[in-house]
Amino acid sequence: LIDGTGESNEVRMSDEEADCTITASGETIVKMRNGDLNPMMAVMMGKIKIKGDMTLAMKLQSLI
């Protein structure tokens, strides 16, 4: 869980209610991190699944 409600993002390994859930394979994450795959293209290709608040998902792109 990434909690961005405070002054800085807090990452926790807990099972809490989330406003946005993003699912992707490890391979997809590595390709995005290396710059071999654009996150928006990955969503359009179905390699990333987003449930919930899409605006939060768009903010996460800057972290990758």
Image: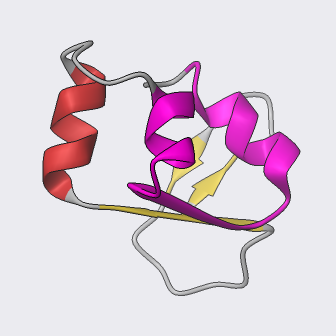
Q: Residue at x 13, y 48 (%)?
A: 27
Q: Is residue 31 above or below residue 5?
A: above
Specify the segment rendered in magenta. Answer: 39-62
Q: Position of residue 61 (x, y in %)?
A: 57, 27
Q: Which of 7 and 55 is in front in this view?
A: 55
Q: Where is residue 51 in the image (x, y as percent from the top left)?
A: 70, 71
Residue 64 placement: quadrant: top left
Q: Which of 47 and 30 is in front in this view?
A: 47
Taking the image as shown, residue 16 lies to the left or right of residue 18, namely left
Magenta stretch: includes residue 20 = no
Q: Is residue 60 above or below residue 34?
A: below
Q: Where is residue 55 in the image (x, y as percent from the top left)?
A: 86, 42
Q: Position of residue 20 (x, y in %)?
A: 72, 64
Way the structure is coloured: secondary structure
Q: Is residue 4 above or below residue 61?
A: below
Q: Residue furthest top?
A: 35
Q: Which residue is drawn at 45% across and 48% down?
A: 45
Taking the image as shown, residue 9 lies to the left or right of residue 38, namely right
Q: Can residue 56 be seen in this view?
A: yes
Number of numbered discs on residues:
0
Taking the image as shown, residue 39 lies to the left or right of residue 56, namely left
Q: Residue at x 70, y 45 (%)?
A: 57
Q: Can residue 4 be seen in this view?
A: no
